[in-house]
Amino acid sequence: MAIQFRLNPMVLKTVPLFAAFSDQQIATLLNYVQHRSFPRNVYVIQAGDETDSLYVMLSGKVKVVISDEQGREVILGFLGAQDFFGEMGILDDQPRSASVYTLEPCEMLRLSKAGFVSCIKENVDVAMLVIRNLVRRLRDADRQIENLALVDVSGRVARLLIEMAQEVDGKLVVPRMPAKQEIARMIGASREMVSRVVKELEVRGLIRAERRSVVILDRNISRSLRAAK
């Protein structure tokens, strides 16, 4: 259940999507925006719902998923602060194509469909940000298709670890390693296969597990895997 707050206009100025707006445009935007809070483990939107708004994340973390009637789930990605979602259905006037589920308590801005369309028409910078975001998602989809078609499970796990890793004190670290089931849903594999691959990477000295984090010991992990075959 979402909780709605009184919106502070200054919050809008911290959002990259509205960074180029004048004070007058911000004042107008207030008529279309709501400040909402969501608890952990709830759906913000669900696939098939009518698309009536765009959401901009202020804090927290969500996952974007699609699922079938048996409850099997594929994770399309994760979003955090400053990310936005929901624009696709507004642009093509179609229902929601995926569901968004909170992994942490989240605060978001909900921009109505009318407000979003107005922003696009009146501000080129907003339109370009939305286009870039759509292009990025298209590239991500291309990469996922390539992984499923051309890369084995070991390679998919290795690529995912590299994509999630951050530079920390000269080391490449995945600060919060997802659960094996979550990884499986992200790369299209079974949990058992992911567990075997992660164990194999540790045995080969390519990664090191440290509590919930993982240190990548070989930055060319994918190449090393191919060379070992």
Image (cartoon, grey):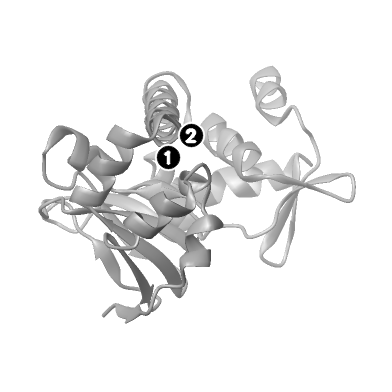
Q: In this rendering, would 188 be left or right of 91?
A: right
* Image coordinates for residue 31, horizontal then vertical, percent: 27, 62
Instruction: Pick whichever of labels 1 and 2 is earlier in the sequence.
Output: 2
Residue at the spot 32% in from the left edge and 79% down from the top edge: 4
Q: In this rendering, would 13 be left or right of 71?
A: right
Please tell me whether residue 139 is drawn above or below residue 181 in the rendered image. Answer: above
Whether residues under marks 1 and 2 lie with C-beta atoms below 8 angstroms apart, the answer is yes
| Picture quadrant of residue 109 | bottom left
Please tell me whether residue 39 is drawn above or below residue 214 in the rendered image. Answer: below
Q: Residue beneath label 1, please?
A: 187
* Image coordinates for residue 229, horizontal then vertical, percent: 63, 20
Which of the numbered marks, if any, corresponds to residue 6? none
Q: What kind of residue is marked 2?
A: Val
Q: Which residue lies furthest to the right in this view?
A: 170
* Image coordinates for residue 194, horizontal then vertical, percent: 50, 47
**Of 59 and 99, which appears nearest the observer?**
59
Q: In this rendering, would 32 be left or right of 58?
A: left
Residue at the spot 53% in from the left edge and 56% down from the top edge: 13
Q: Residue beneath label 2, please?
A: 153
Give the number of the mark in front: 1 or 2.
1
Q: What kind of residue is marked 1?
A: Ile
Q: In this rendering, would 190 be left or right of 115?
A: right
Instruction: Count residues near mark 2 (Cα–Cα under 10 Å), then give few for <14, some for 14-19, many for 20+.
Output: some
**Of 31 and 65, which appears nearest the observer?**
31
* Quadrant assignment for the N terminus: bottom left
Please tell me whether residue 166 is drawn above or below residue 31 in the rendered image. Answer: above
